[in-house]
Amino acid sequence: MEIRVGSFEVEVLYSRRKTIGLTVFPDGRIVLRMPAGEPLENGRRFILEKEGWIRSKLQVGEERLEDAEAAGGCLSDAELRRMGDEAGKDLYRRVVHFLPIVGVSIGRVTIRCQKTRWGSCSSAGNINLNCLLMLAPPEIRDYVVVHELCHRLEMNHSPRFWKEVGRVLPDYRERIAWLKENGPAIMNRVRR
Ligand SMILES: [Zn+2]
């Protein structure tokens, strides 16, 4: 069900939850989740109370969209597939290169196109790398690979972990700064 509250178009979903919940999605969709039997009037009031919060969320979503547009717009499925293939070769080569330098062994390497993280390493030693790294410069790809490999030595971000990253890539801080600055716009090019 769609309702209009002030200037907001709101999608209302009833469920078995106990309290009213509100989500503003990056694409501007507003979803109100209501406990079964809750009067709609309470939902409307809830939205009005949260008006400022909703507006700030919508603003952030709009800015992100603009960033993504500036970075080249949304990626098509075909583009993501192609990037996944390229990443399979390029990132894997980097993993193989850095393995003896970090001095660890790993399990599987999986390439995923995702908008939440650049890479991860499981306690079993399986490494995930984001295909969107193909939109970042080579030295940034190296950094993410080294970061995940170093998690085979330290499963945390302790000083010992960063010391190891720094041993392999002394300028790693600059690479992190690049990712902080430019990473979100790249990730926002994925629609999902
Ligand atoms: Zn980490």
Image: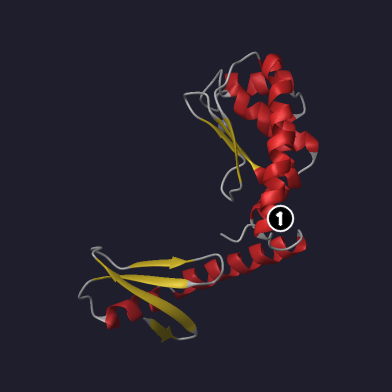
The residue located at (61%, 47%) in the rendering is 113
Mark 1 Cα shell of 10 Å, populated few (<14), some (14-19), many (≥20): few
Residue at 56 percent across and 20 percent down: it is 152
Q: Nearer the viewer, residue 65 or 53?
A: 65
| Residue 130 image position (x, y, % from top left) | 63, 42
- In this rendering, does residue 18 appear at all? yes
* Residue 163 placement (x, y as % from top left): 65, 19
The amino acid marked with disc number 1 is Glu
Q: Quadrant of residue 6?
A: bottom left
Residue 188 lies, in percent from the top left, at 64, 57
| 35 displayed left or right of 49 | left
**For this view, does 192 lie left or right of residue 99?**
left
- Tell me if 96 is positioned left or right of 52 in this view: right
Q: Secondary structure at mark 1?
A: helix
- Residue 117 drawn above or below residue 142: below
Q: What residue is shown at x 74% (from left), y 37% (from top)?
A: 140
Residue 37 found in image quarter: bottom left
Taking depth in this image into account, of 125 and 11 the one nearest to the observer is 125
In this view of the protein, which residue sits in the foreground, 58 or 185? 185
Which quadrant of the figure contains the N terminus?
Answer: bottom left
Residue 189 in sight here: no
Residue that label 1 marks: 79
Of all residues shown, which one is farthest toward the left?
A: 37
